[in-house]
Amino acid sequence: MTTPFAEVIGDPIAQSRSPVIHRFWLEQLGIKADYRACHVPQDSLAHYLSARRNDAAWRGCNVTMPHKQAIVPLLDHVDPLAARIGAVNTVVMEDGKLVGTNTDAAGFLEPLRPLLQRPHLFCMARIIGTGGAARAIVAALAPFNMVLVLAGRDELKAQALLASVDPAGEHHAVPLAHFAQATDFAFDDREGCLDLVINASALGMAGQAPLAFDFSHAPPGSICYDIVTSPVDTLFLQRARAHGFATIDGLSMLIGQADHAFRRFFDALPPRDADDRLRQLLAS
């Protein structure tokens, strides 16, 4: 009997930690299945989907860069959230059709939900990045009536992202350099407010340029969230803690989005009571 499997696809793909997460959960639950990493070059994406469509053992795939947006027109159906985001990170077979969804938004929100469920006088998020992850984060935060300030190398791209994902929101686009330069803005009393500073870009990742962010832009009590996972404890997070801010690392979003994908692939709830051990594996 062929072993059921799911996988993560991308170009490159060797850096992905998704196999560690899913294999850990499969082992913990005693499920006889596998989860792999599959290198799919950009010009082979359509061929990959055609081959997997007819593979009875295939339970679906996670999608990482650079395919999250390119895969959308190749699918039979995309759910409303993924369509609004304009990016798919999870594909499954449903009734013989390739169906795309996006679990990045839910994964991003997971560590923030206790805070977002409280009443606040005012909520603002400063977001760095205009890629697929940023689109998911804007879509995730939009229902919470949060003012978003989106920074990107291309300010027009940031404006277009906000207009397409949440056209009714009260949001602002700024150039990336805006947050790199010090400000003497005097923040008012932030009691009762929720302020987030989010790195949704690859800046600060191993092999990439560091994130240039001046913490004079972060109001007192801000929470700093970095989606980068290599390294887990980025320089941005280290500097945030040095300035007295609470932090959330990229493993929170990575594990959170994998949770929702795992349920779809293997029809089981992942053992989240083992998160500490999983984090140790991912950090090693």
Image (cartoon, helix red, strand yellow):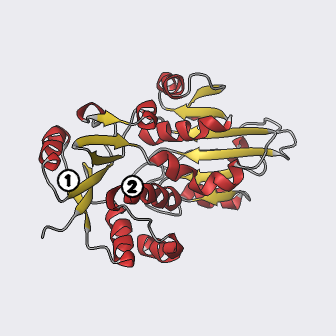
Image coords of residue 159 (percent x, y):
53, 23
Check the image and report above or below for 18 versus 85: below
Q: Which residue is mark 2?
A: 261
Under mark 1, the amino acid is His
Image coords of residue 102 (percent x, y):
41, 44
Q: Secondary structure at mark 2?
A: helix
Is residue 13 shown to the viewer in this render?
Answer: no
Image coords of residue 15 (percent x, y):
32, 59
Q: Quadrant of the C terminus?
A: bottom left
97 or 71: which is nearer to us? 97
Q: Which badge, 1 or 2, comes first in the chain's sequence?
A: 1
Image coords of residue 197 (percent x, y):
64, 46
- Residue 40 falls left or right of residue 87: left
Figure quadrant of residue 207: bottom left
Q: Which residue is mark 1?
A: 39
| Front position among marks 1 and 2 | 2
Mark 1 residue crowding within 10 angstroms, few (<14) / some (14–19) / many (20+): some
Figure quadrant of residue 141: top right
- Residue 168 falls left or right of residue 182: left
- Residue 81 falls left or right of residue 178: left
Check the image and report above or below for 223 versus 128: below
